[in-house]
Amino acid sequence: MPELPEAERARRQIERVRGREIVAVHDRDTYVSRPHAPGEI
C-alpha cells in the first residue's frame, strides 16, 4: 500500500539530511524555543 503523499515527501526530505551534523541553531523565536528562553539553547 503506498504511503500518503505528505508522508512520502517528509520521508524523502529526512532521508536527504540523515547523518548530517548540526553545526548551528537559530533559537530566537520564543514559540519555537519554548520552554527555553530565546538564546538559551
Image (tube, rainbow, N blue to C red):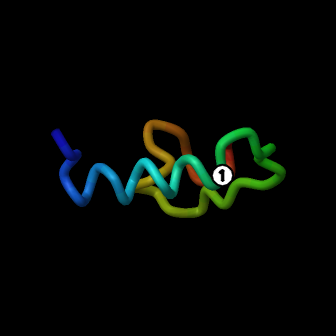
Does residue 23 appear to the left or right of 40 in the view shown? right
Apparent side of residue 25 relative to residue 5 in the rendered image (left or right): right
**How many numbered markers are drawn?**
1
Tell me: 6 left or right of 19: left
Q: Are there few (<14), some (14-19), or many (20+) residues within 10 Å of tag 1? A: few
In the image, what residue occupies the spot 46% across and 57% down?
30
* Residue at 43% from the left image edge and 48% from the top image edge: 11
Residue at the spot 79% in from the left edge and 55% down from the top edge: 24
Kind of residue sitting beneath label 1: Val
Residue placed under numbered mark 1 in the picture = 17
Task: Decide which of 23, 17 is in the foreground and name it.
Answer: 17
Relative to 33, residue 30 above or below: below
| Numbered disc 1: secondary structure | helix
Q: Position of residue 39 (x, y in %)?
A: 68, 52
Please state, as top left, top right, bottom left or bottom right, where the N terminus lies in the image: top left
Q: Identify which residue is drawn at 20% across, 46% down.
A: 2
As rendered, which of 19 and 24 lies closer to the eye? 19
Q: Where is residue 4 drawn, in percent x and y?
A: 19, 51
Q: Quadrant of the C terminus?
A: top right
Camera-nearest residue between 32 and 18: 18
Please state the horizontal and vertical placement of residue 25, each as a whole percent of the image: 71, 54
Depicted 39 relative to depicted 41: above or below:
below
